[in-house]
Image (cartoon, grey):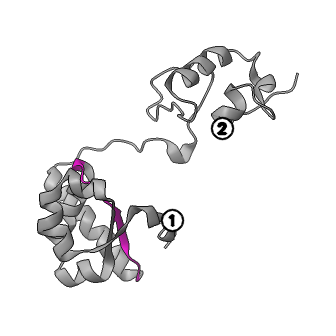
Amino acid sequence: MQEYNLIWYGAVDIFHNTRGSYTHLFQNKPGFKYTRYLIQFFASQISMMDRTETIKMPINSTILPFLKLPQFKKVTTDLEELCENRARYLLNKAISTNRKLTIMYSGGIDSTLIMVSLLKVATDKELKDYVIVLLTQASIFENKNFFTNYIIKKCNIESTYDFTHYLGK
């Protein structure tokens, strides 16, 4: 019997019987039926992956080495200082490589934290020369005061829908 290693899958191809499907290659494998039910229950294009490798899936699976969580280490720096240090590091990297630091801003708590950290460590000139904020109208509505008081006054703004123009640059 031939062995198959599943490295990547498109759930539609493997877990649904469609023309050109690979279901027949895996349907008799242990755990396939249960995994198929999980995929169909949650969504056809969602992959369940536990980077800590503590949750056991119905099929044998492993995390590729570059996707594993790094070893935890104790730090004594507070969150504010960690965020500011990282923002400064990323900005310095953008400056030294003559690239733009592109932030996909949703207006939510995570992207606002990134923006606050950048605003605290960057000069107005650095923001104008090296930072682009990608957003949508929904991003503005999510946090209108922050957008009005900080982003529009200090940053270059582009549409999130153009994000592919910035990939790899």
Which residue is at the front of the view, 147 or 49?
Answer: 147
Task: Say which label, 1 or 2, has the lower sequence index.
Answer: 2
Circle on res. 10 = 2
| In the displayed structure image, the side of residue 111 where residue 124 appears, left or right | left
Residue designated by label 1: 164
Residue 16: x and y, percent?
Answer: 69, 26
Name the residue type under label 2: Gly
The residue at the point 18 percent across, 54 percent down is 143
| In the displayed structure image, the side of residue 147 where residue 131 appears, left or right | right
Please rate how many residues cluster around mark 2, counting C-alpha atoms within 10 Å: few if below 14, some from 14 to 19, many from 20: some
Q: Secondary structure at mark 2?
A: loop
Residue 147: x and y, percent?
Answer: 18, 63
Q: Give the Cα distance between marks 1 and 2.
A: 22 Å
Compared with 155, 36 (above or below) is above
Q: Quadrant of residue 162?
A: bottom left
Please rate how many residues cluster around mark 1, counting C-alpha atoms within 10 Å: few if below 14, some from 14 to 19, many from 20: few
The residue at the point 67 percent across, 26 percent down is 15
Q: Is residue 169 visible?
A: yes
Tell me, yes or no, whether the highlighted magenta stretch contains residue 67.
no
Which residue is at the front of the view, 125 or 90?
Answer: 125
| In the displayed structure image, the side of residue 11 where residue 23 appears, left or right | right
Residue 42: x and y, percent?
Answer: 50, 25
Q: Is residue 77 visible?
A: no
The residue at the point 14 percent across, 68 percent down is 150
Name the residue type under label 1: Thr
Q: Quadrant of residue 151?
A: bottom left
Provide the residue span drawn in magenta. Answer: 98-109
